[in-house]
Image (cartoon, rainbow, N blue to C red):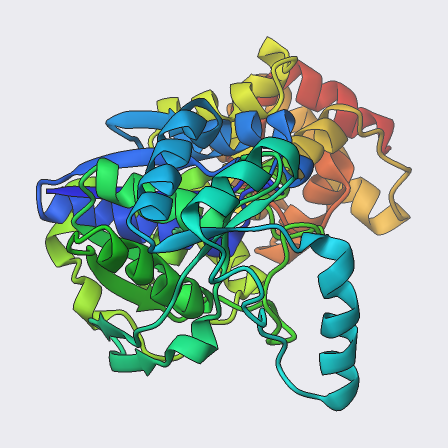
Amino acid sequence: MKLRFAPSPSGLLHIANARIALLNYLEARKKKASLILRIEDTDVARSAEENEKQIIEDLKWLGIVFDKYYRQQERLNLYREKAELLIKSHKAYRCFCGKHKLKELKEKAIKQGIAYRYPGFCRNISDTQSQDRANKEAYVVRMRIDEPVILEDIHRGKIRFDAGELDDFIILREDKTATYNFACAIDDMDMEIDEVIRGEDHITNTARQIAVFNALNKIPPVYIHIPIMLDENRKKISKRAGGNSIKELREKGILPEAIISYLASLGREKEFSVEELVENFSIERISKSNPVFDFHRLLLINESFIKTIDDALLLKHLAEFEPRLSEQQLGYVPVFRNNARDLAELIQMIDEFIDFHPEKLQEDEKETLRLFVKLLKDNDFSESISKLAEQTGKRGKAIYHPIRIALAGKEKGPSLADIVAVFGKENTIKRLSEAL
Ligand code: GLU
């Protein structure tokens, strides 16, 4: 069995695309199917190589792995051959109308508020005439759609599309590159894809793709159209608008585990294994309503992952996030990881601590701190705290507050004992003394 994820490199991979990729990945693992990554780049004007590279990099970073990789740019001959075949069997025809001639008709239709359909001027040109003109004139190739198409979607049930609705759509452009619908259908056929999981925004595309399958007497794959994830304004997440791309989330210091956990809607914020995800996965159970991307919830999950993932894994992510971290900075990771929502914040907290210089404390607090510094010279941290409590009769905040403010400048943060364990007794005494 085979599945595929087929991004177009017209923009970066965003959170909604990543969700579709993940669903395909989990379904493939669940059904022990192989998973193909197919870059749909036949629309040269809208495809960029940097995007393609970044998409591949982002998927790898998320841990979504593929068994095979294709680029449609490298398969253009196949699409041309199939288009020729369709012309020969009269399922497709050359259209010589040109954009110019049709533009007026399109504009007229828009003015009248009706859907534009190709009027079929070139439908009945004879084979010899068509061949003749093809040698001299520019042309596109259109499907000849006479029959309705029935889509049987696993999620949405049966949907019927009348021939008129589908229009005689273009399959090859004037420059002989295949349009998205044609390349996609031919590839799904050629790669023997069994199941297509994609956003429900593709439903009308699917009808056209089924028409291609029908014209070539092939059985289309099973289609599962998933309600797409929307942004916080309940709008479709755009490839061009910033903020929701995997690259940007990564640059903010979100962990891939947090993204996967969020997208898989685990409702849990602890480590999980892919096996666990696969075991509990069922494509039929995916919600029938559109999920809305909630960055705040992702951040909460991220915070929890930063606290709980394996040390080595956290260090690996940090090294990728900021390769120039010093030994000293890395030494503070165990101390500050419990308080950071993302990796950028974690590094910032560490840096703020390292660079911190305390201001002088109030007189009464100075007194407590002075005694503490004295005790710390001959005792370890916890002994010094106990003795300080004994000798001053103070407890809790009254003794911790001056130490915390002098050491780190903040009311809240990691445990003082943890900070001192890494900072060292001598450095601690030095810094505390600055506040006296
Ligand atoms: N290339 C299409 C896109 O990026 C997806 C096509 C598909 O999954 O069939 O939206």
Most foreground residue, 291 or 94: 94
Q: Give me the residue at 83% from left, 50% from top.
A: 364
Most foreground residue, 320 or 223: 223
Give the vertical position of 387 relative to 355 (above or below). below
- Asked if residue 273 can be seen in this view, the reply is no
Q: Determine which quarter of the picture holds residue 237.
A: bottom right
Q: Which quarter of the image is occupied by the N terminus?
A: top left
**Spot occupied by residue 83 in the image (x, y as percentages of width and height):** 39, 41
**Spot occupied by residue 266 in the image (x, y as percentages of width and height):** 29, 60
**Spot occupied by residue 106 in the image (x, y as percentages of width and height):** 72, 72
Give the vertical position of 103 relative to 275 (above or below). below
**Spot occupied by residue 127 in the image (x, y as percentages of width and height):** 42, 47
Q: Give me the residue at 37% from left, 81% from top.
A: 162
Q: Which quarter of the image is occupied by the C terminus?
A: top right
Left or right, 388 with reference to 105: left
Q: Determine which quarter of the picture holds residue 134.
A: top right
Q: Determine which quarter of the picture holds residue 357.
A: top right
- Asked if residue 84 can be seen in this view, the reply is yes
Most foreground residue, 330 or 277: 277
